[in-house]
């Protein structure tokens, strides 16, 4: 009788331990889940606060006056950001024109052309290019690029051109790393087939390998665009930051990001809200880019 | 004809590769050569009234340490959830989408958010803590992604072996999966340190730019990168700006090289075992 009882006791205790373990496992799993969900919470908070502060300003100023307004005069309560939208667009397009050809060719160089020892030097160099703080790029632009432009055009150097050159360099590592990876992962059979058919190495690269790596290369370019649109400190140091419509490569420009950074420290009231509204427009740009990125990479087969 | 065209294109590709390399060498050498002469004990540690770089270095270290303390556990736990537990579903795709979005938000928008949320609403004022909280959200997606990659490199058979021996899932994760991917996790953290050092816009808007040695995390502080921006923008002293930029570059360079050396060391160690 006693023995049966103790056996029962042991059994129930074992059950309890097992239950305990299951409970603990479940609790820990939920801790992991909670950590993962904080990202969602942060995203909602960031988007929510930017919208909550920005949308009332857009409403008060008027959407059309805000987005298409040609004048930005916080003192007179005139808030039009069209010149800055255009400046951001020009700067980004310029950065693409400068950065994509060099970046793409360098990616091909790393993935297909360079001898191994050069590749082993160049790849870490590209990583380093990515790691240089943006404010150092800006400083370099200020001290090296601006005097060169000033010498040619006698305008002080602060200009759209300077912004384009700096951004063009800054997006290089993004484009190179992602494109090179995409090119490297094209199946060997593709290249071998093309070479066996008598195509030259360059024909193979441009007619077979690149088209096969297209979505990766495009993803690299889109991420590079994202970096150019969002860059602040480097732009701030070389752009001149005048809130006027850019008319040429020599115009002093103010991008959307620079607008926020320049005035946020002293802005109050509607002025501050207008800066948040500038952030909303910037957000819209980023969302469009993200959608484009999804469209490009979703075709990829993982 | 075909041959000529081929050589021409090959030449262009070589030139592009050379341009990329030369740009890096140009930037690094230009800054370091101009900055190294100014880099002396006086510049670093100050001399009487003249303040040295020490306050900025301490502020930078504060921000790095705080951000890692906040973001590393969050990021690693998130990555573990996504790799070890998550099943394809609505919740997971929402989490992934959020991480993607966080990764693509420009730093100035993080700054705006930090300014309104941490500085104003949470009443943390312009402080190292506000700066670190803002930056830790910024580096979170990078940590999650890179740790995920590291966890994914652990062969499935390790997990099955451990589970087969009767270990629980938690024990499998803590005793098998994490030890096997520790080098990737450490690499990920070192890379985020590089990012924190380079960050300027978000910190400028949340931690302020008081150039004193901070006594607590509630003090405002000026990091090295903010200091460089301040020196360059106000045109106070290009010599000092060069020297500060040199310090920044050297830090980034050392971090970068140590990441690679560390990864190689682990690889060799694992190879021998």
Image (spheres, grey):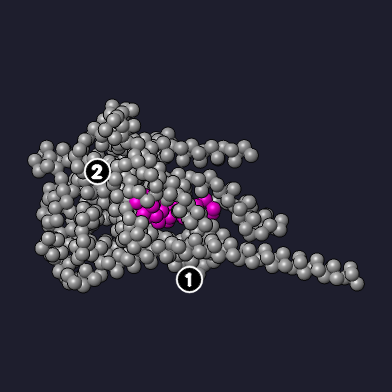
Chain containing mark 2: B
Please name the residue shown 59% across and 48% down the image. Answer: B179
Residue A98 in the figure: left or right of residue A119: left
Image coordinates for residue B269, horizontal then vertical, percent: 59, 38
Image coordinates for residue A105, horizontal then vertical, percent: 32, 45
Q: Quadrant of the N terminus of chain A?
A: bottom right
Image coordinates for residue A88, horizontal then vertical, percent: 21, 56
Chain containing mark 1: B
Please name the residue shown 45% across and 53% down the image. Answer: B71
Residue A114 in the figure: left or right of residue B271: left
Closer-to-camera residue (B120/B11): B120
- Residues rendered magenta in the picture: B127-152
Residue named by callout 2 = B230
Residue A6 in the figure: left or right of residue B196: right
Q: Would you place residue B94 above or below residue B111 in this image? A: below
Closer-to-camera residue (B118/A197): B118
Secondary-structure class at tag 1:
helix
Image coordinates for residue B230, horizontal then vertical, percent: 24, 43
Residue extending farthest to the left is: A154
Per the image, is B271 magenta?
Answer: no
Please name the residue shown 72% across and 64% down the image. Answer: A17
Q: Residues within 10 Å of mark 2 (few under 14, many from 20)?
A: some
Q: Quadrant of residue B122?
A: bottom left
Residue named by callout 1 = B90
Judge depth for marks 1 and 2 and give the one in front.
2
Secondary-structure class at tag 2:
helix
């Amino acid at each position: 009788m006693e023995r049966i009882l103790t056996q029962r006791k042991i059994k129930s205790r074992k059950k309890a331990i097992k239950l305990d373990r299951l409970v603990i496992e479940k609790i820990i799993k939920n801790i992991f889940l909670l950590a993962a969900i904080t990202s969602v919470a942060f995203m909602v908070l960031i988007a929510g606060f930017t919208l909550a502060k920005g949308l009332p300003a857009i409403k008060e100023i008027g959407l059309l006056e805000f987005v298409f307004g040609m004048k930005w005069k916080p003192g007179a309560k005139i808030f039009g950001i069209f010149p800055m939208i255009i400046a951001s667009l020009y700067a980004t397009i310029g950065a693409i024109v400068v950065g994509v050809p060099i970046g793409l060719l360098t990616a091909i160089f790393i993935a297909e052309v360079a001898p191994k020892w050069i590749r082993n030097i160049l790849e870490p160099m590209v990583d380093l290019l990515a790691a240089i703080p943006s404010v150092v790029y800006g400083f370099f632009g200020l001290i090296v690029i601006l005097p060169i432009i000033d010498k040619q055009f006698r305008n002080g150097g602060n200009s759209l051109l300077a912004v384009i050159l700096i951004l063009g360099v800054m997006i290089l590592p993004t484009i190179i790393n992602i494109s090179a990876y995409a090119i490297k992962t094209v199946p060997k059979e593709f290249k071998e087939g093309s070479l066996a058919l008598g195509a030259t190495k360059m024909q193979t690269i441009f007619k077979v390998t690149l088209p096969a790596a297209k979505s990766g290369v495009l993803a690299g370019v889109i991420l590079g665009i994202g970096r150019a649109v969002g860059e602040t400190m480097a732009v701030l140091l070389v752009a001149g930051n005048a809130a006027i419509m850019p008319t040429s490569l020599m115009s002093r420009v103010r991008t959307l990001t620079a607008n926020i950074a320049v005035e946020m420290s002293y802005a109050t009231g509607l002025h501050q809200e207008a800066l948040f509204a500038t952030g909303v427009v910037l957000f819209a740009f980023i969302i469009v880019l993200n959608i484009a990125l999804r469209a490009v990479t979703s075709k990829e087969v993982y | 004809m075909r041959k000529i065209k081929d050589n021409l294109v090959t030449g262009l590709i070589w030139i592009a590769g050379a341009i990329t390399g030369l740009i890096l060498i140009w930037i690094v050498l230009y800054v370091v050569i101009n900055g190294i002469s100014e880099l002396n004990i006086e510049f670093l540690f100050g001399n009487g009234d003249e303040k040295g770089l020490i306050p900025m270095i301490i502020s930078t270290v504060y921000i790095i340490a705080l951000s890692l303390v906040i973001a590393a556990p969050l990021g690693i736990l998130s990555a573990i959830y996504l790799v070890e537990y998550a099943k394809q579903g609505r919740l997971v795709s929402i989490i992934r989408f959020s991480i993607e979005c966080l990764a693509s938000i420009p730093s100035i928008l993080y700054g705006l958010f930090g300014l309104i949320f941490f500085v104003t609403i949470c009443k943390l004022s312009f402080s190292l803590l506000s700066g670190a909280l803002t930056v830790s959200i910024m580096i979170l997606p990078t940590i999650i992604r890179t740790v995920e990659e590291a966890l994914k490199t652990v062969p499935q058979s390790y997990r099955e072996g451990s589970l087969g021996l009767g270990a629980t899932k938690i024990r499998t994760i803590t005793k098998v999966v994490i030890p096997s991917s520790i080098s990737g996790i450490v690499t990920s953290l070192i890379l985020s340190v590089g990012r924190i050092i380079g960050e300027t816009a978000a910190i400028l808007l949340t931690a302020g730019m008081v150039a004193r040695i901070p006594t607590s995390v509630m003090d405002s502080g000026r990091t090295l990168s903010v200091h460089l921006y301040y020196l360059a923008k106000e045109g106070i002293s290009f010599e000092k700006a060069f020297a500060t930029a040199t310090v920044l570059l050297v830090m980034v360079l050392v971090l970068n090289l140590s990441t690679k050396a560390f990864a190689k060391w682990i690889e060799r160690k694992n190879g021998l075992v």
